[in-house]
Image (spheres, helix red, strand yellow):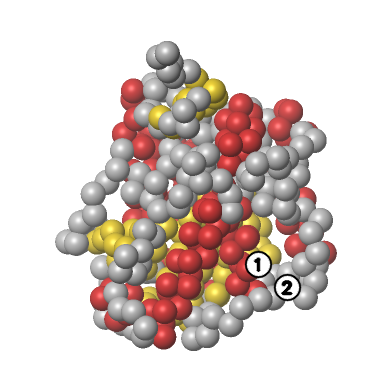
Amino acid sequence: MVFQRSIVDQVSGWLTVYNDGFVDRTWTGPPQFKFMSDPVPPHHNFINGVATDDLFTHPGSDLRVRVYLPEVPDSGKLPIILHFHGGGFCISKADWFMYYNTYTCLAREAGAIVVSTYLRLAPEHRLPAAIDDAYSTLLWLQDLANGKVHQPWLSSKGDFNRVFLIGDSSGGNIVHQVAKKAAGENLHPLRLAGAIPIHPGFLRSEKSKSELEKPESPFLTLDMLYKFLKLGLPVGSTRDHPITCPMGEVLQGVDLPPYMLCVAEEDLVIDTEMEFYEEMKKAGKKVELFVSNGVGHSFYLNKVAIDVDPKTSEETRKLIHGISHFIGNH
């Protein structure tokens, strides 16, 4: 009997799952957008004011990170931004062009070292695998702060008293999970100075008004959103799982760092993101709101739109500046 591979599930353009467990992440959408998911090799020389490196966190470890070092005068230690990429927990990697383009800009403008984790992907590695990888990276930074391990750029230039969490889309969900987990731990001498979820995938099983009424975008359709979460969440979970639906959770007594919640006016999930914001305020947490007007989910990662649409370009500039300002004030 010859085994015949068949498609079990598919997210148009991004991902195909087969009945033997194989997952094909070959881009099959419009070819003019493919470059945004192409890997950018690391470069130790400064290009446009930023050098990059890829490395494993510990000998024998599978956990890998990309580090962005800005070219700045020797004027003291630099804040550290720990970045978690998006992709609905199922696609994308830290070395994709869309992240390289964004986080070289942020490293340069904020004058900060960016550390981006290569997160394990679902459905091969369902949640909480990506959260575990993210938190393990934070513990690696603590080891660097303690001098237990050494990385030339971070050990010599990083300010471990000013570590910020940042994440795009589903990476924003991971920011919140890592911040909560860190709240109950002694990370000394490392200090979490802030958390910046950008367009986090907060929603519930019941569709919100914005899910029903806001326009779909190249980076977020309802089909993508629901299928990625079905493949990414623990088996048997619904969208009401705490990772995707933190609204209403008990935060009293949880020592969270200051938050800067970034939302986009035309995002499909803005209603539930705003619900999270109101819940944080009710719980007495320090939370700032940054709204990008007239644009949709993860707009700032779309280099094509940035190049051809002045509105997208201007809102991207404002977002990078706003994040840099938050980091500068904390």
Residue at position x 52%, y 65% from top? Answer: 135
What kind of residue is marked 1?
Lys
**Residue 319 in view, yes or no:** no
Pointers 2 and 1 in contact (CB under 8 A)?
A: yes
Q: Position of residue 229 (x, y in %)?
A: 62, 38
Q: CA distance from mark 2 to mark 1?
A: 7 Å
Give the left or right position of residue 168, taking residue 157 as reference: right
**Residue 176 in view, yes or no:** yes
Residue that badge 1 annotates: 180
Is the C terminus in the top left, top right, bottom left or bottom right quadrant?
Answer: bottom right
Q: Nearer the viewer, residue 154 or 104?
A: 154
Give the mark nearest the N terminus, 2 or 1: 1
Which image quadrant for residue 313?
A: top left
Q: Nearer the viewer, residue 252 or 71?
A: 252
Q: Position of residue 168 (x, y in %)?
A: 52, 50
Q: Position of residue 41 (x, y in %)?
A: 23, 49
Q: Residue furthest front?
A: 1
* Helix, strand or loop status at disc 1: helix
* Helix, strand or loop status at disc 2: loop
Residue at position x 62%, y 60% from top? Answer: 177
Is the N terminus in the top left, top right, bottom left or bottom right quadrant?
Answer: top left
Residue at position x 47%, y 32% from top? Answer: 21
Please tell me how many numbered marks the rendered image carries: 2
Give the left or right position of residue 8, taking residue 75 as reference: right
Give the left or right position of residue 189, taking residue 253 as reference: left
Q: Say few, some or many: other residues with alpha carbon within 10 Å of mark 1 (under 14 / 14 to 19 / 20 or more).
A: some
Q: Is residue 300 above or below residue 75?
A: above
Q: Is residue 86 above or below residue 65?
A: above
What kind of residue is marked 2?
Val
Residue that badge 2 annotates: 254
Q: Residue furthest top?
A: 1
